[in-house]
Amino acid sequence: MFTGITQRTSTVENTKKTDGGLVVVVFNNLGKLKLGESVSVNGVCSTIKKIGKHITFEYMPETLRITNLSILKSGNIVNLEQSMLFGDKIDGHIVSGHVDTTGQIMGIKKEGNSQVLHIKVSNKKFMKLLVYKGSVAVEGISLTVAKVLKGSFVIKIIPYTLANTNLRYKKVHDAVNIEFDILAKYANKK
């Protein structure tokens, strides 16, 4: 489990396609880690395969189908968050690291000291899980929904979040990972 509060951004050193999967290597700026530990990479719960100066993760076809990880390349900036421990303070919201779908940034604009992102949801069935002022994780970042539209939503990014996450590098038409609030999922379960 994660909180959606990005601890560090890191640079993708390289990626390598495997038999249907993908290996991603990022610079290790999280400090002491253990093999098998979970780290959120752009919101995707990822298991550490190798550690040292770099961290190596391996992804299966299902993860690549649902997320934007398949388009990662050397030099891209990713958000990293170590999994939380029982008793940790939750500054964001409960984030499982199980991305539901991707979205596409349809618009970016400044509004005072914030940046406004308009995101179109790839899989419309998830729209019922969004509510005004509710929580959503975009690229693993716990954010508040500012507006719910037909097939899309709006979030407003405060300066600190923009300066300390990969959202500062995003452009119109870029794909982002989206995880909808777990409480909304349980409330909407049929």
Image: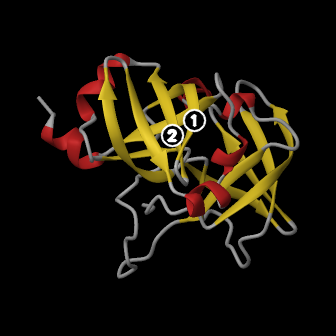
Q: Which residue is mark 2?
A: 116
Q: Which is more toward the observer, 120 or 75?
A: 120
Q: At x 47% / y 37%, what residue is drawn?
A: 178
- Residues 141 and 101: in front is 141
Position of residue 47 measured from the top left corner of the image (x, y, whole percent): 62, 55
Can you tell which quarter of the image residue 98 is in?
Answer: top left
Say what secondary structure mark 2 lies in.
strand
Asked whether disc 1 touches disc 2, contact meaning CB atoms under 8 Å apart, the reply is: yes
State which quarter of the image contains the N terminus: bottom left
- Viewed as shown, does residue 116 lie left or right of 179? right
- Against 151, residue 179 (above or below) is below
User: Which residue carries the number 1 mark?
Assistant: 109
Instruction: Say which label, 1 or 2, has the lower sequence index.
Output: 1
| x, y percent for residue 167 | 63, 46
Residue at image position (41%, 34%) is: 154
In the image, residue 161 sits, relative to residue 62, either above or below, namely below
Residue shown at 35%/42% (left/top)? 145
Q: Amino acid at mark 1?
A: Lys
Q: Is residue 11 visible?
A: yes
- Residue 107: x and y, percent? 56, 26
Question: Where is residue 100, by image quadrant?
Answer: top left
Residue 18 vs 14, above or below: the answer is above
Find numbered disc 1 in the image and state the secondary structure of the residue it sits on: strand
The circle drawn on residue 46 is none
Label 1 vs label 2: CA separation?
5 Å
Label 1: how many Cα within 10 Å (few below 14, some 14–19, many 20+): few
Quadrant (top left/top right/bottom left/bottom right) for the C terminus: top left
Scheme of image coloration: secondary structure
**Left or right of 17, for residue 95:** left
Amino acid type, label 2? Val
